[in-house]
Image (cartoon, rainbow, N blue to C red):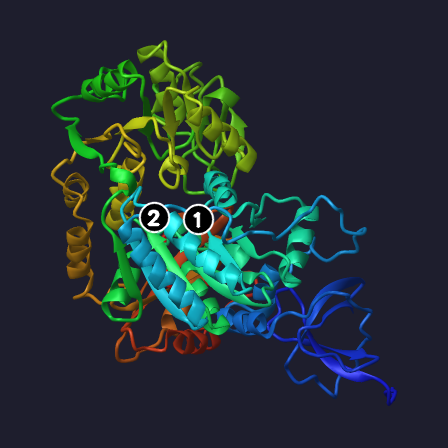
Amino acid sequence: MARSSRTSRVSVLLPLPFDSAFTYEADEPLAPGTLVRVPLGSRQVVGVVWDTKPDEAVRTRKVAEILEFPKFPAVLMEFIEWVAGYTLARRGEVLALALKESLLRPAPARAKKFIFGGADPQFAPPALSTAQEDISAVLRAAVAAQKFSVTLLDGVTGSGKTEVYLEAVAESLRAGRQALVLLPEIALSVQFLARFTARFGAAPAVWHSELTPAIRRETFRAVAEGRADVVVGARSALFLPFPDLGLIVVDEEHESAFKQEDGVMYHARDMAVVRARLSGAPCVLASATPSLESVENAARGRYMRLELPARHGGAQLPAVQMVDLRAHPPERGRFLSPVLVAGVQAALARGEQAMLFLNRRGYAPLTLCRHCGHRMACPNCTAWLVEHRHASRLVCHHCDYGVAMPVSCPACEAAHSFVPIGPGVERIAEEVAVTFPEARALVMASDVIAGPQQAAAAAAAIAAREVDIIIGTQMVAKGWHFPHLTLVGVVDADLGLAGGDLRAAERTVQMLHQVAGRAGRAEAPGHVLLQSFAPEHPVMAALVSGDLAEFLAQEAAQRRPGHWPPYGRLAALIVSAADEKLADAAARALARAAPRLPGVEVLGPAPAPFALLRGRFRKRLLLKAARHVPVQEILRDWLARAAIPKTVRVDVDVDPVSFM
């Protein structure tokens, strides 16, 4: 069919699992970045005109609509290409992170209630200490230079890191550029937003998965039009269409929550550095417990490192004490040792608040038949079902499978024979109600605190001293500022050390140091009690001494000889299929095609720790390489040489954080 001389061919990338752009006809030339609606099969899809050469030979269809929307910035398009190349994801999958289906469907005129911008850098400048002011001046200068740089802001809990990097945000506002602050969890935004508003006289735009479609659409457009001057968001905020990004801050940069574990497997901390480089903007990585990767980058001179070694306003770091559970065991059927019970009682007697930390949701992690030993397991995953007593259900925390608590054992049919094994936060709350009957307790866990509004209500109740004892999971471990909280008790300090995960010790130190940092942030001194069966473990020694630098030096000494990250590269291939034999065969085919190159080692295949997950059988292969090895190039060649059936999925995880 002859083409009209007035039409033009364009390449359009669609937010779907395709790596290549599609060719369409348009009535006029369209510049790269133009958003269009195009036909695909029987439906219409929003896509982006890409800067690849259209195919002149194929028969094609016409662009249905040119959207009245700012063009995608060239920097964002380059970023999408970079992320796809690094993670080996298809470009359309990465574009989908930036173009959610709900964002651009036809919508009524924008409602007046959505207000963006208005942050005033001069509204309420903080009174900074000399140390804070010195570091703030360095960060402000980096923003004013409008050049790429990376700064690791390493400050103890309560040192005022937030106030310092907000001054960098203020400098970005003065320059008329946008700023992005990434937080690892939605719940952390509650107190942060209040502090931001107090500093700048206006709230920032917020971006996370809990927003309604209408707010997402309006926020997306406000960012693209430059009206949203500051965005506070989860990792996906990196893919927003900022036309002039002048600063990226990654708060709690060590957090594993910044790693996307399915779909496009990217680490938001690392990709934030890339986005900043492409934008010609500084990136600030803030943490009280920096990752070994960031510490090593600072040591190599790639990052500048600035330190705040003391708490702000004269507050002291809490005293950390081990409680040896072998010497001071809890009463039978209980989980709080006499030492911890006495510590909580003393805090309550002084009119102060206490926190009990256990990183385990629900009532009990395992339910066992006392007659035959049968364990209630998930049919879809290699995981035990977790009892949630308030809901009278057993739930899998990996696939959300749930079943009512059975009256009789499905194996031996004994009635009422199930017993809970081990504690979750619900069980600790039950023990608290018995041990401290007059105390007002509040559980903070992701299945109890559903979203920012409930988190805000919980934080307000704690701040108003309507709560005496906070019982929480990792949700309470970081970011919160509760002035009247003086005692933190860790119910099971050994919990994160089980298994052979490369980063288990590092993550445990980070989490427990962060949760310890919730204590004594105001005038009253803080006290931390860590219950452990292994108080001599190096992790426990590091927490008691507070010498995290020495701990990281020991970690580095263990990883360096074997070229484990950050002294080498890792990439995981996760093979999964609904049929176990198919998964096995595909994993063996990959093993036969494995690269045999200097500086490269392939481990596996082996069953993944979760050998069955969401109904799919899983095998893992691990590519281990020296730092200089071009891992992506090797992976592409490897995958191209292995014949994998279409019913088998191979997920590639470059720089894995978790080994599940």
Residue 128 circle label:
2
Regarding residue 501, the answer to whether it shows in the image is no
Q: Quadrant of residue 103?
A: bottom right
> As displayed, is residue 325 above or below residue 287?
above
Amino acid carrying label 2: it is: Leu
Q: Position of residue 398 (x, y in %)?
A: 47, 42
Of the pair 466 and 87, the residue shown nearer to us: 466
Q: Position of residue 480 (x, y in %)?
A: 39, 37
Per the image, label 2 sits on a secondary structure element best described as loop
Relative to residue 367, is residue 502 drawn left or right?
left
Q: Quadrant of residue 71?
A: bottom right
Residue 125 circle label:
1
Residue 117 circle label:
none
Tag 2–tag 1 contact (CB < 8 Å) = no
Of the pair 137 and 497, the residue shown nearer to us: 137
Q: Quadrant of residue 201?
A: top right
Relative to residue 266, is residue 537 drawn left or right?
left
**Residue at 56 percent of width and 62 percent of height:** 239
Regarding residue 216, the answer to whether it shows in the image is yes
* Quadrant of the drawing holding the N terminus: bottom right
Per the image, label 1 sits on a secondary structure element best described as loop
Relative to residue 240, is residue 639 drawn left or right?
left
Of the pair 415 and 250, the residue shown nearer to us: 250
Q: CA distance from mark 2 to mark 1?
A: 9 Å
Q: Position of residue 104 (x, y in %)?
A: 72, 58
